[in-house]
Amino acid sequence: PAQPNATLKTDGSGADLACELHLTNAGPLAGDQVVQAYLRPLDVPLATHPVETLVGFERVRDLAVGAAATVRFKLNARDLLLVTAAGDRVSARGAYELRFWLGTDEGDAQAATLRLTLAGEQHVYERFPQP
């Protein structure tokens, strides 16, 4: 099985968040691995939001025994938007988890979790057309 660790980086400008997951094949055979990244709101003050949202996935091919690989994801502001009950897409302050999952023969296994917090006021990026 792959043994991961993860990091989250930003330049502080409000631009993309760079996420890296480092994998090492600790199993007895070479193989492929699919890494999935999900964003999960924890204490977001909206009445409705998904439990978690897929924000990226990447396949690592032919990872030899003992070999390491780095999977990179970029999250932008749009990846962090939630939809209100009225259908508006908004940024919502609060705590989030970025959860990485690995596809395995036994099913999916959680690999690593990073926490992030969005500060500031809620901002409406797109209004849903109203009748």
Image: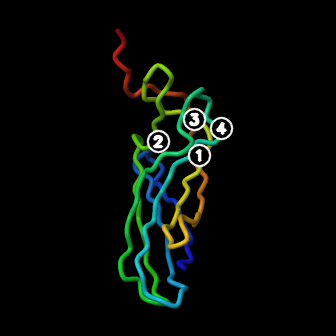
Left-right relation of 121 to 19: right
Q: Which residue is mark 2?
A: 80
Element class at badge 1: strand
Residue at 54 percent across and 34 percent down: it is: 49
Marks 2,3: beta carbons within 8 A: no
Marks 1,2: beta carbons within 8 A: yes
Q: Earlier in the sequence, mark 2 or mark 3?
A: 2
Marks 2,4: beta carbons within 8 A: no
Return the residue nearer the eye: 55 or 20: 55
Task: Report, in whole angstroms, how far the alpha carbon at label 2 lies from the one at label 4.
Answer: 14 Å
Q: Which residue is mark 4?
A: 43
Element class at badge 4: loop
* Amino acid at circle 1: Tyr
Q: Which residue is mark 3?
A: 93
Element class at badge 2: helix
Task: Report, in whole angstroms, how far the alpha carbon at label 4 lies from the one at label 3.
Answer: 9 Å
Horizontal and vertical percent position of residue 3: 56, 77
* Amino acid at circle 2: Leu
Marks 1,3: beta carbons within 8 A: no
Marks 4,3: beta carbons within 8 A: no
Task: Report, in whole angstroms, how far the alpha carbon at label 1 lies from the one at label 2.
Answer: 9 Å
Q: Which residue is mark 1?
A: 96
Residue at 61 percent across and 35 percent down: it is: 44
Image quadrant occupied by the C terminus: top left
Q: Earlier in the sequence, mark 1 or mark 4?
A: 4
Residue at 61 percent across and 53 percent down: it is: 115
Residue at 58 percent across and 28 percent down: it is: 46
Image quarter of residue 89: top left
Position of 25 relative to 52 (above/below): below
